[in-house]
Amino acid sequence: MTAIAVTDLNKWYGTYHALRDVNLTVAEGERIVICGPSGSGKSTLIRCLNRLEEHQSGTISVSGVELNDDVKNLDAVRREVGMVFQHFNLFPHLTVLENCALPQILARKTSRAEAEERARHFLQRVRIPEQAAKFPGQLSGGQQQRVAIARALCMKPKIMLFDEPTSALDPEMIGEVLDTMIHLAEEGMTMIVVTHEMGFARRVADRVIFMAEGQVIEEAPPEQFFTAPANPRTQEFLRQIVH
Amino acid sequence: MEHIAARPAPAKPPAPILRILFGDAVSALITVGVIGLIVMMLPVLDWAVFDAVWQGDAEACRAGGACWAYIHDKARLILFGIYPPDQQWRPVVVIVLILAMVVASLSPRFWNAGLALLWGGAIAVMLVLMKGGVFGMVDVPTAKWGGLPVTLLLAVLSLGMGFPLAVLLALGRQSNLPVVKGISVCVIELVRGLPLIGLLFVAAILLPLLLPSDWTIDKLGRTVAALTIFAAAYLAEVLRGGLQGLGKGQAEAAQGLGISYWKMVWHIILPQAIQKVIPPLTNTAIVMVKNTSLVMIVGVFDMLGAGRAAAGDPAWPAPFTETYLFVAAVYFAICFGISVYARWLERGVKRKSYA
């Protein structure tokens, strides 16, 4: 089954051509890592997948539903897709538990009791159940990102998007977030991860996609991607990040 | 490497009071200046306290000291205006009701749709109480309303109705839809560009001339409308500051979770935006409470208007100063209350120690 199909996707910011004829197919259960230099369009691409950015041409379909101006389709897609941001974007005025419970109540009409129970369940899964009553500002960056993952999982998504989930973290906290993501991958979640954590890509990814200047330059299984990259730009990029 | 245990910081010795007051030339000069000013103002005490007339009639007040006996005599007139004296239990109940509702609304924990409904109901009860004409209460036309209840009703109504309007204007101003944005900007800029007195004149005098003659909207109602739109424009700009301070991430997270626009506004955006702008919101609220005194100009008898009318009584020796001091004291109590409350709210926000 195809989870995501992107064909000939183009996106402009004003006159800047940010995504250029991008094609991408992701099967259910597949784990994709997207990397590339900053400004290469990798964040823009995954932000298009739940329409945080609107594309101008090409098609995106998620679980068979096409993303267009139809609000019903958009709601359907956002029900399927969970997103984790670089800067966590937790709601600072709500407790950790409420961060996970309230979106279920607002967007899924879940009862409060059920929402809180599921929130506690997923906080347990990301191994911070004891922080439920605290506010996000009282947690470390790594803990906040794990809450953000739990919050997204509470919505029962079929696909998870990660937009540089460890880029804003102190080095000693990156491991705990990656561990959580590895767990999720092992459970069979369909994941698209924008990251520069090449260790994670090697271990988890089914395919690694390299982007530059809004285009997909190279697409390969991790083993081949890291040992025998075909494109000189990929070789150059790998030389720069693996010193 | 040897482990060094944490030690407490050394205590800072308190600065002696004399050094604070006279430590250097500038401090000494300021201290002497302030003491001098206080000494110069001492004669005011003679007037306000020692020579003051606390009890008695108009004759006793001719001596020259402050005539507090007059305030005692005219308190009802200042507080309730020309509302029929035998019916004055009604404005008293209204004031008590307003105070009770304010106390019930203090804690942010109770801020929900239910409380908004309760306020709507309470306001309706207050207006019925003031107006009468039903349940065996004598009908009192709004032209006879006056004093503190009018001041409080104007302040509560203009801020209470202005706030939701301000939320719409502030959101509209940020909208991507050109028409919505255009209308919001026009309303805000137009109202902010007009003096409140001008707006009140338009509402009180010009509007009845422009509208068809069978559209009779009560003068007090028109005044409330003018104050409301004025408060809304200023509150909208305050709120816009809070909305801009939020960053795109909050809205994106909510959208990504599939939360609909108005639920996002109500549960995610507004609570945070308001928390960020408590000090300027307080400022606007205090200014609006005092702005209600301008309605006197179009002939609505608020507390200041009632006070002026009371002081004009020829039987007493023109006790305007005493009247203004009394009215000022009531205004100060209200505004200082708002100020203290806002500081308490801010402490609550800080306790949550946000990142």
Image (spheres, helix red, strand yellow):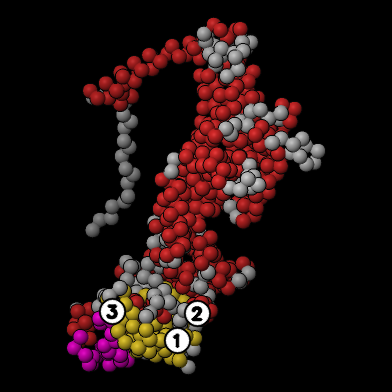
Which residue is disc 1 drawn over?
A: A61
Q: How far apart are marks 3 and 1 (CA)?
A: 21 Å
- Label 1, secondary structure: give it: strand
Which residue is disc 3 drawn over?
A: A17
Query: How many numbered callouts?
Result: 3
Q: Distance between the residues labelled 1 and 2?
A: 13 Å
Q: Which residue is drawn at 31% across and 35% down?
A: B12
Q: Nearer the viewer, residue A227 or B263?
A: B263
Q: Distance between the residues labelled 2 and 3?
A: 25 Å
Q: Nearer the viewer, residue A236 or B184?
A: B184
Q: Disc 2: which chain? A: A
Q: Quadrant of residue A12?
A: bottom left
Q: Disc 3: which chain? A: A
- The image shows residue A180, relative to residue B220, as above or below, that is below
Q: What is the crowding at mark 3: few (fewer than 14 residues within 10 Å), some, or many (at least 20)? A: few
Q: Could you say where residue A157 lies in the image, as x and y percent from the top left?
A: 50, 79
Query: Viewed as shown, does residue B182 lie left or right of A219?
Result: right
